[in-house]
Image (cartoon, rainbow, N blue to C red):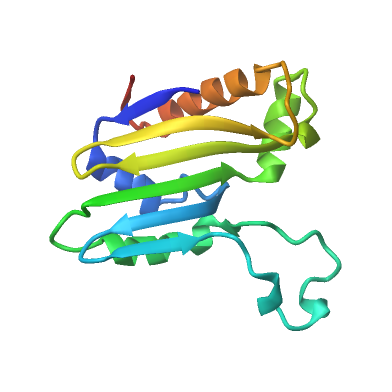
């Protein structure tokens, strides 16, 4: 797990809410506090889809893709005043997680990793990104954590997102 403090909020918010920088992620949860506090649960309600033909016998995703929700988050945050607080819990989507672990020759098979998690927390002044790895069962190896930490820093560097390691 690493913690990264964002250096340029305006640039980061553009990457988060407008650009496609984080479109490879799924939203687990969002909490945005402005004039009131909004909670968004990213879990997909399968009951919403009335007929099974909409699912097409494919594995139904657990969370909503970030690119389908970020417009709503943008609408809640935009305005003359900055939010008092926000927190986003994002997961690197399953396909990209499996590809990353395979590319890095992880000693932990991708199916044992439940999620590579990115927590984004803004306290009214600064934003801090923290990484985490969720597993389906207890594992001694922490290699996926190290791979995820290294990958996220390289990804932010490639997107010219400035940060300081805490």
* Quadrant in the rendering for residue 109: top right
Is residue 133 in view from this perspective? yes
> What residue is at 22 percent from the left and 54 percent from the top?
83
Residue 127 pos. (x, y %): 29, 37
* Quadrant in the rendering for residue 104: top right
> What residue is at 78 percent from the left and 82 percent from the top?
51
> What residue is at 25 percent from the left and 66 percent from the top?
36
Q: Nearer the viewer, residue 57 or 62?
A: 62
Q: Residue furthest front?
A: 138
Residue 87 pos. (x, y %): 37, 48
Q: Residue furthest right?
A: 57
Q: Residue furthest left?
A: 80
Q: The C terminus lies in which quarter of the figure? A: top left
Q: Residue furthest bottom?
A: 50
Left or right, 150 with respect to 15, comes to right
Left or right, 102 with respect to 164, comes to right
Residue 125 pos. (x, y %): 18, 40
Left or right, 23 with respect to 136, comes to left
């Amino acid at each position: 797990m690493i913690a990264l403090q964002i250096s340029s909020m305006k640039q980061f918010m553009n990457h988060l809410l407008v650009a496609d920088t984080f479109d490879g992620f799924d939203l687990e949860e969002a909490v945005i506090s402005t004039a009131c506090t909004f909670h968004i649960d990213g879990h997909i309600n399968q009951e919403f889809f009335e007929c099974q033909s909409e699912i097409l016998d494919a594995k139904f995703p657990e969370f909503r893709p970030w690119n389908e929700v970020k417009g709503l988050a943008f609408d809640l945050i935009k305005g003359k005043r900055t939010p008092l607080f926000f927190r986003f819990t994002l997961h690197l989507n399953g396909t990209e997680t499996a590809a990353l672990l395979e590319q890095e020759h992880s000693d932990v098979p991708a199916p044992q990793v439940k999620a590579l998690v990115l927590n984004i927390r803004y306290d009214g002044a600064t934003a801090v990104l923290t990484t985490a790895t969720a597993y389906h069962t207890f594992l001694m190896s922490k290699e996926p954590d190290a791979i995820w930490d290294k990958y996220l820093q390289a990804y932010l560097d490639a997107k010219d997102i400035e940060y300081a390691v805490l």
